[in-house]
Amino acid sequence: MPELPEVEIIKRQLEDKILQKKIADVWWDRDRMLRPGPATFQRGVVGKVIQALDRRAKYLFLRLDERVVVEAHLKMSGRFFFVDREHKGDGKDKYVHVRLKLEEGELFLSDPRTFGYLSLLTTSQLQQRLQAIGPEPLTDLTLQQFREIVGSSGRKIKELLLDQRKIAGIGNIYANDALWLARIHPSLPANQLSSSATTTLHSAVVEVLSEALRKGGSSQQWYRHVDGKKGSYQHFFKVYARAGAACLRHPGQKIQYFKLGGRGTFYCPQCQDLYDF
DNA sequence: CCACGATCCTGCTAGC
DNA sequence: TGCTAGCAGGATCGTG
């Protein structure tokens, strides 16, 4: 579920809550959600202090010491809640499957679909993970780099945007919306984008992700902030989840839906013409 | 190199 | 009203 903006918001909010706190205990009810296994995970984290928090693509990393890092991924429906001693329990949330009990407060991992996980990584495993991820669009991805990525692939542009090895953090919502902003058809082979279309798309990606960040992310269904509040970008979707609704530029046109690479894809046939680029 | 489907799960909803 | 098929913010792996 969460894409770059959502994970970034969670990271910023968690920094205020869990940094420099010691992990006192771990509770879980789904073995799969703790890697490489619950016993190893528990042994590896209990007694350690959370020294730093980093985000890369849609991953969160909790640095415990020089050798050990916890990688967190929320996948489709995961969310983190922080609960103080005062504000007791998120008893309403029946999807909490992991709890990290801290010296003060508790970090809950809630996930209806249970695809999310916490994974204990060694430094070398972390390096391996990091080097497989493309540049961060909001801080590192230059237009020059973007040109190289786009120009060297014959894949459909939307699939390329979603490929974390090429560019970090873009998911289905923002891929759809960025392509609409840039007026590019999702199925266009990447290396057929004109120079100006490539420039426009680079800006569109940055613009969409920045807007989502400002609006607190997209709380379409599951996503929530660490305090349980919703983001608001879902009220500003350009094409995502708007099949059959009017295009924001062409009120007479209806947003179309089809599957591309197994993912729901939305576009306006008038502004995003496959043969006009 | 590229396209597509299956898979890990559970919840929600459109349509009959 | 009740049921069911299909779909869902991700990532990975296998097949053709």
Image (tube, coloured by chain):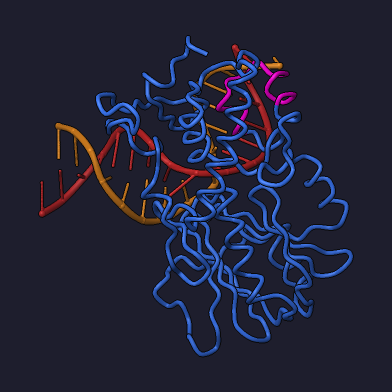
Chain colours: A blue, B orange, C red
Horizontal arrangement in the rendering, residue A193 relative to residue A50 (left or right) = left
At x 58%, y 21%, the residue is A197
Horizontal arrangement in the rendering, residue A273 relative to residue B3 (left or right) = left
Find the residue positioned furthest to the front: A196
At x 58%, y 29%, the residue is A201
Residue nearer the viewer, A236 or A45: A236
Vertical side of A44 occupied by C8: above or below:
above
- The quarter of the picture where residue A140 lies is top right
- The quarter of the picture where residue C1 lies is bottom left
Total number of numbered discs in the rendering: 0
The answer to whether residue A77 is magenta is no
Horizontal arrangement in the rendering, residue A14 relative to residue C7 (left or right) = right
Residue range highlighted in magenta: A147-162
Q: Could you tell me residue A80's position as x and y percent?
A: 55, 66
Q: Could you tell me residue A75's position as x and y percent?
A: 56, 50
Main SS class of the magenta portion in the image: helix
Vertical side of A162 occupied by A58: above or below:
below
Q: Could you tell me residue A55's position as x and y percent?
A: 69, 56
At x 71%, y 78%, the residue is A23
Find the residue positioned furthest to the top: A275
Residue nearer the viewer, A58 or A143: A143
Q: Could you tell me residue A2's position as x and y percent?
A: 53, 51
Find the residue positioned furthest to the bottom: A86
Vertical side of A194 occupied by A19: above or below:
below
Horizontal arrangement in the rendering, residue A157 relative to residue A102 (left or right) = left
At x 63%, y 54%, the residue is A73
